[in-house]
Amino acid sequence: MVESLDELEKLVETAGGIVVARETQRLDSPIPKTFVGSGKAKELAELVRRMDIDVVAFDDQLSPSQQANLERIFGDPVKVIDRTALILDIFGRHATTREGSLQVQLAQLQYVLPRLRGMWSHLMGEQTRGGIGSRFGQGESQLEVDRRLVRDRIAALRRELARLETRRNTQSKARWDSGIYRVALAGYTNAGKSTLLNALTDSKVYAKDELFATLDPTTRSIDLAEGRKITLTDTVGFIQKLPTTLVESFKSTLAEVRAADLVLEVVDAHDGNWEKKVRAVNDILGQIDAGDIRRVLVFNKCDLLDDEALGELRAHNSDAEFVSAEQGTGLAGLMHRIASEASAGDVTLTALVPYEKGMLVKMVHERCQVIREQYQDNGLFVTLKAGERMAATLRPYEIDD
């Protein structure tokens, strides 16, 4: 519970708030009416008044009725939000691309729809008094209009996101057909994925010590020492209790993980709860049908550990990589590991590629490990190692060595 509240506090700070108090209550199950017990709700109301609190954030998802009841107990203008609303607020701040903004809007509207209430309550009084016009039920009608508008907007957003996803799938298929090996960075939020991307690709992607600093996927290319080009994609960070609606809304963005050949699961080595967070990440990877993709654990921020702690971590995770993206240590070893994974399924073949196939000649140099080559009168004579897709492209030009 303490760990989860620590994370909630970090979320509040990322959203621009200041935490002034923390309260907990042990219950076998949430109270249907107010989530917490009635006595606790009154105690919180007194705390809110005494400390002049503006927002009360709950660590779990509240039902619309629970949220309404708590706001009624706390009184105006206190706002009651839950973990989902807080994450949505942060996502709204960090979405920069068109697709990211649309995904945030969709998730926000799905959250708001069942919570539309009381916006036209001043008209409801007219109904109770009777008289001319009371039989039309103005308040109820307006609420239905609001709901219909929200539903229409949700449908429009889904259509537009479907079009964008189709375009993304086309681009992803083009990269697949090209034979480029694709690596995705995945992991718990604030594990240092963006910093690692910058360190490996010499980029300047936004990276900051806050939750969900990266929302939209960013792809960069890397030339491996052997001469092969690969792509590396940074993706949105995961978190415990990530709402299902958010996972659904961001499936097209997370498709970058699903389409990868290799997932580097970045872990904050200095985090005492890293094992629990790895489980949370694995659960979400399963939800997006990426659970079967080859994964390599990458422990980041190893510079924050002393020698004894780092040695113990290495002893229990012998197949992992250990780096400090901030300090630049361990990156050469990680690149060697990526190269090994990229070439694991390679086949060796010899081909004579005609010069008129200029694009194919370029692909040979960018996407294969060239062992030897010779420029002959009728084409490029080359022996190389290539991945499955690139090897299939070269089969028509294969010759006996």
Image (cartoon, grey):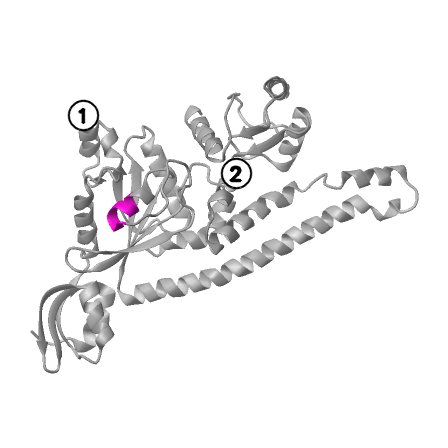
Figure quadrant of the N terminus: top left
Image point (25%, 57%), residue name = 230
Q: In the drawing, does residue 168 fall left or right of residue 151?
A: left
Mark number, residue 84:
2
> What secondary structure predominates along the stretch shown in magenta?
helix
Residue in the picture at 66% in, 33% down: 68
Q: Quadrant of the C terminus?
A: bottom left
Q: Residue 308 has which mark?
A: 1
Q: Residues within 10 Å of mark 2 (few under 14, many from 20)?
A: many
Q: Position of residue 375 (x, y in %)?
A: 10, 75
Query: In the rendering, at what x and y percent does residue 297 appear?
Result: 26, 42
Q: Is residue 211 above or below residue 358?
A: above
Q: Residue at x 28, y 67 (%)?
A: 178
Q: Which residues are magenta?
A: 196-202
Quadrant of residue 398 within the rendered picture: bottom left
Residue 376 vs 63, above or below: the answer is below
Question: In this rendering, does residue 75 appear at all?
Answer: yes
Indicate the position of residue 95 as horizontal and vertical percent values: 47, 48
